[in-house]
Image: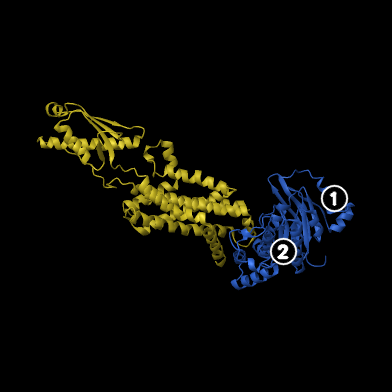
Amino acid sequence: MTTKPIISVHGLTKTFGSFTAVDAISFDVAPGEIFGFLGANGAGKTTAMKMLCGLLSPTSGQARVAGFDLSTQTEDVKRRIGYMSQKFSLYEDLTVAENIQFYGGIYGLTLAEIKHKSIALATELGLTLEMNKLVRSLPLGWKQKIAFSVALLHDPAIVFLDEPTGGVDPVTRRQFWDLIYAAAHRGVTLFVTTHYMDEAEYCHRVSIMVDGAIKALDTPHALRKQFGVASMDEVFTLLARGAQRSAD
Amino acid sequence: MKQLYTFVRKEFLHVLRDKKTLLILFGLPVVQILIFGFALTNEVKHATVFVRDDAHDDASRALIERIDASQVFDVVFNGPANLDLIIPSGFANDLSHNGHASVQIITDASDPNRATTLSTYLTAIIADHQLDLSEMQGIPYLIRTTTRFTYNPQLKGAPNFVPGVMALVLMLVCVMMTSISIVREKELGTMEILLVSPFKPMMVIVAKVIPYLLLSIVNIISILLLSVFVLGLPINGSIPLLFSMSILFIITSLALGVLVSTIAATQQVAMLVSMMGMLLPTLLFSGFMFPIENMPLPLQLISNAIPAKWYYNIVKAVMIKGLGMDAIMKEAAILLGMSVLLTAISVRRFKVRLA
């Protein structure tokens, strides 16, 4: 990597009492990269991601996210990142436009900016007619796309996607990945956790966590080669088999 | 500040979109005032007295007329009645020759409160009648004691339940609605998004409680208007004092609501905790339904921990008795202490959960 990493993690650790959820993980993510963050349930990937988003404070170790120190400049980090969870996290009893206004508003966007963004977003997603409909009435695939666009509303440098395609059919998932690629093309870094191994193949680089530690980190192609298997699924199975912890 | 406005606006949209919540919010105080005002009254009016008059003399007839003339009782001579009065034969004779006579009152003890009230009323009427008789006979040096109620002279229900309904409604709106609305964000996963955003957790709490603070004030106004114009119960004390004390109680309840939201994981749990943990004690221990003085000591001690008890006393003192700040110093200080303590605990818990 020639460019300065946008996420830089060194020995990041989180313990809960005597339990070490995340055990001194270290990695770098380049700007515009789609970084797949894999791991079985209970491997510690959610904890790691929560630390990177500023939701949990690390027990030890350092991390720089979007150019700011995670421990001392949490507020600056928060301004520069976006987050989308598997629940899509839109207000069902508000319209699409109202959701955009709200999320834009809490990130401190001006009314003119919000208006401009709403129009751009509606055109891009083909939702011009649905802007004033309640989110509740929209299909799951659309909610997912809107949630992703909302996470990008304040032009974050990095977007964290926590299992963003849960419960969505394969066709919609494929369309969603088109949006992810488009965002990466614009220079946004995407940090994605997923359970779907076909999605792991779409990532530029993939890390696999087992028992709180990163056991493998490379491009999907290199990982397949390293383990001498044909798919990411097999790579994952080989690594996860060594897990000591049971899923939570 | 603009972010806070955006947030509060969103909260209002939630409330306005949810027709059921809206109905509970604004229908509940009206329904409670009407139910307590007109249906659940413990005032006694036109209770029936069955009289078996075995005497059939002037003295017994005079007594019966006296009872029938009162607003409280209607005399009947057959059919079931709320109360039985038996006048033995020779009533006039006993009275004029022996100087004393007995009657028997039979009450329905399956409803002890009503039975006690009715027999007290009837005894009082008989005593009155007896006094009149002795005055007519010109017995000197008669000491006549009369009891006059200066608080609530007509023994109306409204002065007791309006403050109770105020406490109950505020508790419901502030604790239940607030905790549910915060827990809903947790369930939806939107809370995570808010916490990842630069919006401060403290501001999330502030933004969440502001709409319910305003709605509670609207509720107080509507309860007071109903009580003045529908129940005819005037506000005797200072209105600004009544409102500032109500806001103090609202803040206490909102802090409780935030506290419940930090305990509850789902909306159902939040609702149950609010109902069982907050509303029930408010009903039982505020003194609004059951007199606290009659409770065993441990329960009396528990009642001190219920914010609604102190608020109920304040509203009674200010609204009904027309007293000023100097009369409610103790209650106000306790409520203030509770609100500071609860706010501190709930804000702390809210933050701990996020860490």
Give the number of the disc on residue B153: none
Evaluate whether residue A141 shows in this view. Answer: yes
Which percent across, then down, holds residue A17? Answer: 68, 45
| Label 1, residues with CA under 10 Å away: few <14, some 14-19, many ≥20 | some
| Label 2, residues with CA under 10 Å away: few <14, some 14-19, many ≥20 | many
Instruction: Choose between B122 and B62: the one closer to the eye.
Output: B62
Residue A161 occupies quadrant: bottom right
Which percent across, then down, holds residue A72? Answer: 67, 60
The chain letter for the residue carrying disc 2 is: A
Residue at left 22%, top 41%? Answer: B70
Q: Amino acid at mark 1?
A: Glu
| 3D distance between C-alphas at marks 1 and 2 | 29 Å
Residue at left 47%, top 46%? Answer: B279
- Assess whether mark 2 and mark 1 are in contact (beta carbons under 8 angstroms): no
Sequence order check, earlier mark of 1 and 2: 2
The quadrant of the rendering that contains the N terminus of chain A is bottom right
**Number of numbered discs on residues:** 2
Q: Are marks 1 and 2 on the same chain?
A: yes
Q: Amino acid at mark 2?
A: Ile
Instruction: Choose between A92 and A226: the one closer to the eye.
Output: A92
Secondary structure beneath dot 2 equals strand
- Chain B colour as displayed: yellow
| The chain in blue | A
Which percent across, then down, holds residue B195? Answer: 63, 58
Evaluate whether residue B336 shows in this view. Answer: no
Residue at which label 2 appears: A158
Residue B102 occupies quadrant: top left
The quadrant of the rendering that contains the C terminus of chain A is top right
Which percent across, then down, holds residue B71? Answer: 24, 43
Residue at which label 1 appears: A234
